[in-house]
Image (cartoon, grey):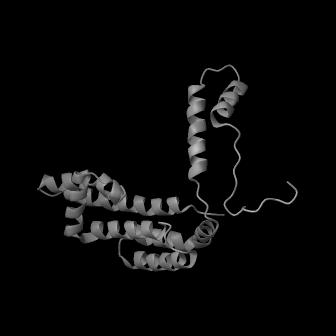
Amino acid sequence: MCFDPFHVVKLATDALDDVRRQAWQLARTLSDKQIAKTYRGARWALLKNPENLTDKQASTLEALKRDGGALGRAYELKEALRAVFAGDLGDEETIAMLGRWCSWAQRCRIPQFVKVGKTIRKHLDGILAAIARRLANGRHEGLNNKVRLIIRRAYGFHTAENALALILLACGPVTLTLPYHTATHPHS
């Protein structure tokens, strides 16, 4: 069983959003309502990749990082995990960095990230299998979304065969080759 690095990073992204939401809920109880608006407006600045931020989002993110606290640490943890899976490290380096990240997350005293660290350690074999085999679910999920869209458009067709024909027409013959199947089979 393999666990796609995208979904591993998504665990950290969801934990970061939960930390932001808690900070926002706490700020709503304060007399200065502008603080709550800052946390509420910071959602996309925290969740987007830094290279995709607008100027306003980048300045919001810088302000949050300057303030520090749990939200700033949570953001740094999310970005560090993203960097582990960026693809510029070898397998051994990735494994070592992932172990260091889990240790950092479990010591950070942010409950959401302690849980993410434990979850990653629990499923480490599946994550390492995905890294070693260079597997990702992106293509499959994209194909599934396309099929769902076609089925939604095909609503009202009289038979399932018509919807299937539309799927085959749009998606063509699907042939998937796994990254570790590089040599051709001798009997082909």
Q: Is residue 150 visible?
A: yes
Q: Residue at x 64, y 37 (%)?
A: 171
Q: Residue at x 20, y 55 (%)?
A: 38
Q: Residue at x 69, y 58 (%)?
A: 178
In depth, the one of 169 and 5 nearer the eye is 169
| Residue 155 at x, y percent in the picture | 59, 24
Vertical relation: 59 (above or below) 133: above
Side of 122 where 187 appears, left or right: right
Q: Quadrant of the N terminus?
A: bottom right
Question: In the shown orientation, is residue 90 left or right of residue 27?
Answer: right
Above/below status of 172 relative to 56: above
Q: Provide residue 40's location: percent of width, then percent of height.
A: 25, 52
Quadrant hosting residue 4: bottom right
Residue 163, percent from left and from top: 66, 27
Where is residue 170 drawn, in percent x and y?
Answer: 63, 33
User: Residue at 56% of width from left, 41% of height from top?
Assistant: 145
> Eyeballing the image, is 175 above or below 16?
above
Q: Is 137 placed left or right of 52 in the picture?
A: right
The one of 39 and 91 positioned closer to us in this rendering: 91
Q: Which residue occupies the foreground of this view, 132 or 128?
A: 132
